[in-house]
Amino acid sequence: MPALKLASTRRDFPRPYTTVDVLIFTVVDDALKVLLVQRPSGSDDPFPGLWALPGGFVNVDLDADLEACARRKLREKTGVASPYLEQLGSWGGATRDPRGWSATHAYFALMPADGVVLAKGANAADVAWFTVDDALLAKKKLAFDHAGILRAGVERLRGKVEYTSLPAFLLPEPFTLPQLQRTYEIVLGRPVDKSGFRTRMMAADFLAEAGVVESGSNRPPMGYRLKDRDAPVFFPRTFSPRG
């Protein structure tokens, strides 16, 4: 029997650059914010001095898959190992990176700002939280096609907030129902009808009581924690705006 010919492993065609970018959202000072990193000035890398989404090249020795790369970048930039993480989409083309044909796979992460330690990393001049609406209005030009990716991420987040429990992932635990409602309003950019909010949250059965929370009132409010931090719950209808 003749020996089977093994397929050649030689790379006989060009390979695109492959990166992962992460949109890291939080709520600070009553505003939805996103983490941006500033690219170093005077470097040979493209877009020196501009702000960009945190991310970088896939490391085939460290990253078992795209999500592993996203989580590695999250740890490097914030010190947080396991926030809520969801794949947003992929962007690719011959002109998005002047170094050559590139594809990036974007994720968005939700986390409370409490306990986050921002780290610049070796390839960043600075790192900071920016109000999402300021970034979307292009008050600061973003590198690559990151403005479009950020816009898509904010639209995805605000769309899903209408019918899911996602804002709870932005709060430190324990949190109160008024704090949760306020977070919904911050992300949506509009008030939410208060009358049915508590009923909807309790009926969805995704919160566990965590004891009363200290406050200045005569009746301290109940604090809550998420029963499952891996996935949101889905509501049967969207929120009604408050008149």
Image (cartoon, rainbow, N blue to C red):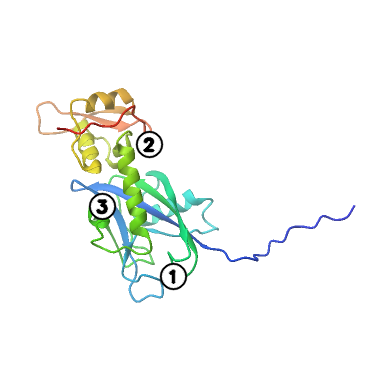
Closer mark to the observer between disc 2 and disc 1: 1
**In the picture provided, is 103 more to the left or to the right than 123?**
right
Q: Is residue 53 visible?
A: no
* Residue 35 placement (x, y as % from top left): 30, 55
Task: Please identify the quadrant where the C terminus is shown.
Answer: top left
Distance (Cα) linking label 3 and label 1: 26 Å
Per the image, label 1 sits on a secondary structure element best described as loop
**Which residue is denoted by mark 3 in the rendering?**
132
Looking at the rendering, which quadrant does residue 13 occupy?
Answer: bottom right
Residue occupying image coordinates x 41% and y 44%: 86
Distance (Cα) linking label 3 and label 2: 24 Å
* Residue 15 placement (x, y as % from top left): 56, 64
Whichever of labels 2 and 1 marks the residue nearer the N terminus, that label is 1
Closer mark to the observer between disc 3 and disc 2: 3
**Which residue is denoted by mark 1 in the rendering?**
98
**Which residue is denoted by mark 2 in the rendering?**
229
Distance (Cα) linking label 2 and label 1: 39 Å
